[in-house]
Amino acid sequence: MKMLNIKLPKGTRDFTNKEIIKRKFLINIIIKNFKLFGFSPLETSSIEKISILKKVYEKENHKMLFNVINSVDLGLKKNALIYDLTVPLVRHIKMNLSKTLLPFKRYQIQKVWRAEKPQNGRFREFYQCDADIIGQKSFWQELEIILLCDKIFKDLKLKIEIKFNSIKILKEVASYLGLENKFKKFSIILDKYPKRNEKQTLSSILKLGCKKEKIKIFKFFFTIKNTFKKNIKSLTKILNIKSISEIKNLKRLYKLSKKINLDSSKLTFSPTLARGINYYSGIIFEIFYKEEKLSLAGGGRYKKLINSFKLNDNLSGIGVSFGLDRIYNILYKNKILKRKTKDRLDTIMFINFGDKEAFYSTKLIKKLRTYGISAFLYPKKIKIKKQIKYALKRKLSIVFLLGKKEKKNKILKIKLLANKEEMIFKNIEEFINCSLKFNKIKKKT
Amino acid sequence: MKMLNIKLPKGTRDFTNKEIIKRKFLINIIIKNFKLFGFSPLETSSIEKISILKKVYEKENHKMLFNVINSVDLGLKKNALIYDLTVPLVRHIKMNLSKTLLPFKRYQIQKVWRAEKPQNGRFREFYQCDADIIGQKSFWQELEIILLCDKIFKDLKLKIEIKFNSIKILKEVASYLGLENKFKKFSIILDKYPKRNEKQTLSSILKLGCKKEKIKIFKFFFTIKNTFKKNIKSLTKILNIKSISEIKNLKRLYKLSKKINLDSSKLTFSPTLARGINYYSGIIFEIFYKEEKLSLAGGGRYKKLINSFKLNDNLSGIGVSFGLDRIYNILYKNKILKRKTKDRLDTIMFINFGDKEAFYSTKLIKKLRTYGISAFLYPKKIKIKKQIKYALKRKLSIVFLLGKKEKKNKILKIKLLANKEEMIFKNIEEFINCSLKFNKIKKKT
């Protein structure tokens, strides 16, 4: 028999009980806030027609798709695993346009797949966590998304910086540099700037065909220090744009965000922010924690994506995507997650003393469960020490010891594993009352 | 521009907000009980090495796998989407044997994919919902799984029948019929029996090479009426087996299940029950609702699966899998789910009266959210009637009307959409207290 190679596919992983508890702490805070902001859940298929995916993404992303092939109906290259949650959202709306109430506010937390090179912290199978509003161009929606980010990171106790910019301003910059026809390449270079240095970035831009004297503008870009107001003033002066409505919008957004007092966020205008995804059309933003160069969330306003689905033209969208794995890592480093899972699991184990006592225990276990108390019998009569060792390893707090004597005298003996204390109860009701009072066991209903 | 064909791949689907709420009601009851029985969650990768999957499943199932292919590292036919949750479980244990505490009790609710022909109620992408115990052969584990099923269907208010049998008894039957070398084919025929008739089944068995006089045994099989005790007595007599330990086990299981009083289940010995999956080795069971021929859950004891992974030999497993979609449909038919989602969603909408009032509203919305109350501003100043129409369609119960007058006089006006009643509050705290008291808004924290 050939030895099996027992491995997971590259870039995938399992989550154990411990990790799931910690991840849930994070996800629950995010979902709670999505709901507070009036978003409803949506869940879409994990597989989409490849014709749709290829239509929306740029060619260089096509090779990152995972094709899904079955031998029954020769679906060769017809379907692929989803690459993000935005395309499924827009596809869903297009398929259900008559039933969809606009503006449509949905959140979605699901696995997506990308055939990138797996790295430390970068997986091929991972969760995306998005909230989007479709069907309203109104300024209030951009404010809503910023308030949402602020509230989530407030609840996570992380101080963040929200860097923002706009595709419309970037286009003005490209036009000033004479690079309007190379906008995509230009924005890719800018997008890489935080991971490179100024020299590298400038040389790449010059190579695109930008005139040397105009490159001076980047001095201002790279050393942004003044207030937003001054910066936007300088920028409009250099670019010689009198007043594009987008600048008005950004000013207003900035002003109201200041007035409303963000709790955990610093809002910063960042003229080099570009975001790598091609479907943004208005404001773009990215969230950073302290000096870390990794962004924890990001998003923006888009309409191109929706155009490619031939949806009604006023169906613009704005969305934000949270990087669950990155946020998780920071919470973990800050020991915020450690505390959350310190509590012992509130399951009760009954020691197995043999068949008669085991059946007696099973009846009590059944009763405990109807009271919402989690309990189980150790499956086999082995040495009591070994059974208790198992309970300790599972981090349980209480074991029941119902041996021959206890069964005969109709008393209940328990052992608190934390301090080895033993206690006697007259009946199961007395135990339930007592345990609920001591808050050792939380009633789950 | 070529028109895009906006469709979902065959056999996949989206779940909307409404459906998600209803499905959650079902899933939460199941998870609550998994936890009550001491099971912990596990989440595994959605993709597995195809070498592992092909090793475990029978050849005829290989064509039901969805291959996952990416162009980056030429993973042609190296990986596939998971087909069930049992193989990933055993693979996970094999990979983490030193860290895994045995008996290992885990539950898992995840998507799986099968390239079957999609039908009414049968999907290619669907959720499986499993609980398994690995590492103990003890009889108490079989009882535990039966009690788990009983409790879950009790909470779902569905009366069920648990039909059970054992692969070991089936093997005795096959041997009696002279079909021991055709056991797999024999068990496939039995498995199909409920969907065919007696004649068809008998003729198939005769075709396998069974002697005509021995086929009489099926008269007894097909018309099982007596008590379990009598039936098992007749069976052992016909088969001329004095005492195999499995029969002792089944007797004991049956006796204790009766003694412990199952709340929602009738336990029935069913000698024709075979289950289609090849890895079972001991007890098998399937759960039916009333006269419906569809099974709602099923499972059994297995060790073959674990052998193919070359795990330690005493690592036997027992598990149960719940058919979420089928249970959902029955709950839906019984209108149990309808009631659950009748309650209006407790989000509050603020009418948009223009920029100044909108900002004033935004500040109040921010406050409401810190109190755990979900709220949002309608994004645009359009006719109030239209805004209220949106709120009604979203099934909200309260809108805030903060116009010029209300803002100036610093009062809060709300409208209850159910009865069009209007109410005035002095400040947001008064509203919060009142709304909490009326229990119109549940505090979410």
Image: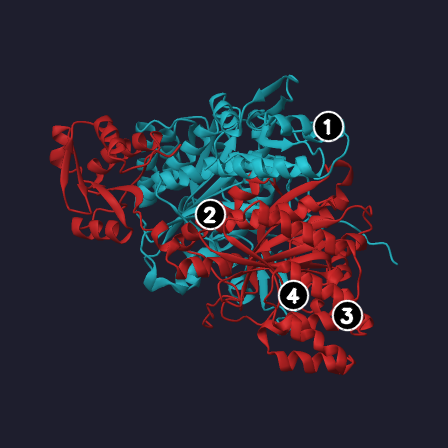
Chain colours: A red, B cyan
Disc 2 from disc 3: Cα separation: 39 Å
Look at label 3 and name its amino acid. Ala
Disc 1 from disc 3: Cα separation: 44 Å
Numbered badge on residue A273: 4
Disc 4 from disc 3: Cα separation: 13 Å
Look at label 4 and name its amino acid. Leu
Numbered badge on residue A174: 3
- SS class, disc 4: loop
Disc 2 from disc 1: Cα separation: 33 Å
- SS class, disc 2: helix
Q: What is the chain letter for disc 1?
A: B
Residue B210, can we see it? no
Q: Quadrant of the N terminus of chain B?
A: bottom right
Q: What is the chain letter for disc 4?
A: A
Label 1 packing within 10 angstroms: few (<14), some (14-19), many (20+)? few
Residue B57's x, y, as percent?
53, 58
Q: Quadrant of residue A52?
A: bottom right
Identify the residue at horizontal 29%, vertical 37% (top origin).
Answer: A441
Look at label 1 and name its amino acid. Lys
Q: Is residue B3 above or below residue B19?
A: below
Label 3 packing within 10 angstroms: few (<14), some (14-19), many (20+)? many
The residue identified by callout 2 is: A155
Identify the residue at horizontal 44%, vertical 48% (top origin).
Answer: A25
- SS class, disc 1: helix
Numbered badge on residue B389: 1
- SS class, disc 3: helix
Residue under disc 1 on the same chain as residue under disc 4? no
